[in-house]
Amino acid sequence: MVKKKEVEQNRNIDSKDNGGQDKSNRIIFIYRIVVSIIMIISIILVYILNHYGESKEVDAMFNSNSISVGNSYNSNGIVDETLISNTTADTNTNDDGIHITSEENLKKLNDWKLMLVNYENTMPEDYIPPLSNIEDDRQFDSRAADSLIQMMLDMNSDGINHIWAQSTYRDPNKQGHLIEESIQEYLEEGKTQEEAEALTLRSIGEPYKSEHNIGLAVDFNDVNYAFESEPAFSWLMENAEKYGFILRYPADKEDITKIKYEPWHWRYVGPEYAKEINNLGMCLEEYIEYLKNN
């Protein structure tokens, strides 16, 4: 009887020991699971925080590079340096495929020589370019006037004497009068008001939307298509870029410039830009977009 009680006691003790061991094993197992879950959550949080931080940096860079070029000029035609991004991005896109304009190109886009004035880019209404006389009744941007004069003198030296600047700087008020005169001429030819206005805007920019208003455009000779067959035109096509001038409205770019082909209209952009624009086969609008996207 005593032995039977001892056996039962030993069984109870063993049962308690086994139960305690099982409980310990379960606690250790649960602990390991909890630790693993915490580690996984930590890894996920670190990834999210890092990715979010990079995204904010990209957004900041992208937003700073999206400044409108036209708004970078103040009323004096001087670049507002506060609008130039201080990013040092050197590539076209980041890892997410977002275009980033390089710092060098941002400075080019804000260069007064590349000021884009056209049907959708209006110059500041209080902007008055610095002007110098190239003739008694002709003015040009004083920063480019010497280049225009030297180009015409060199044409004379090469035997081309039939050349003169017919139209250079025009104030916006005069631009408005030219538009009114052109519309009236088309009306007298039998065009409707709508047709007359549309035809006029194909050759004359509205006030504050004409390159003549910023003093960087010149129309040569009689301002007609006969100029294309004159020696002066051939000389300009070969040499004008050396002096910083480009044919502003090429025949194959009418759908972009929205201005009909004008062999007499030349625009100063500076020698560096003129050569690059010609080498790329672009008009000024295309070149501006090229700089924005590179």
Image: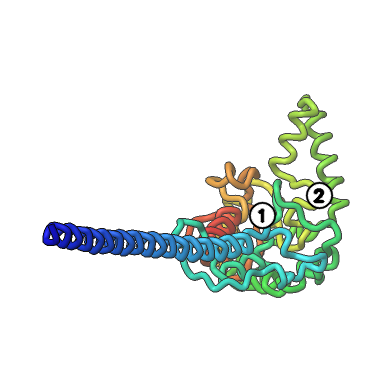
Per the image, label 2 sits on a secondary structure element best described as loop
Question: Residue at point 58% right, 65% down?
Answer: 61
Sequence-first disc among 1 and 2? 2
| Residue beneath disc 1 | 265
Question: Residue at point 80% right, 39% down?
Answer: 182
The answer to whether residue 162 of the structure is visible from this angle is: no
Judge the density around disc 1: few (<14), some (14-19), many (≥20) Cα neighbours within 10 Å: many
Per the image, label 1 sits on a secondary structure element best described as strand
Residue 2 lies in what quarter of the image? Answer: bottom left
Question: Residue at point 59% right, 45% down?
Answer: 256
Q: Is residue 186 left or right of residue 245?
A: right
| Residue beneath disc 2 | 207
**Quadrant into which the N terminus falls:** bottom left
Considering depth in this image, is 234 or 181 the residue closer to the camera?
Answer: 181
Residue 80 locus on image (x, y percent):
74, 70
Disc 1 residue type? His
Residue 192 locus on image (x, y percent):
78, 25
Residue 253 locus on image (x, y percent):
56, 47
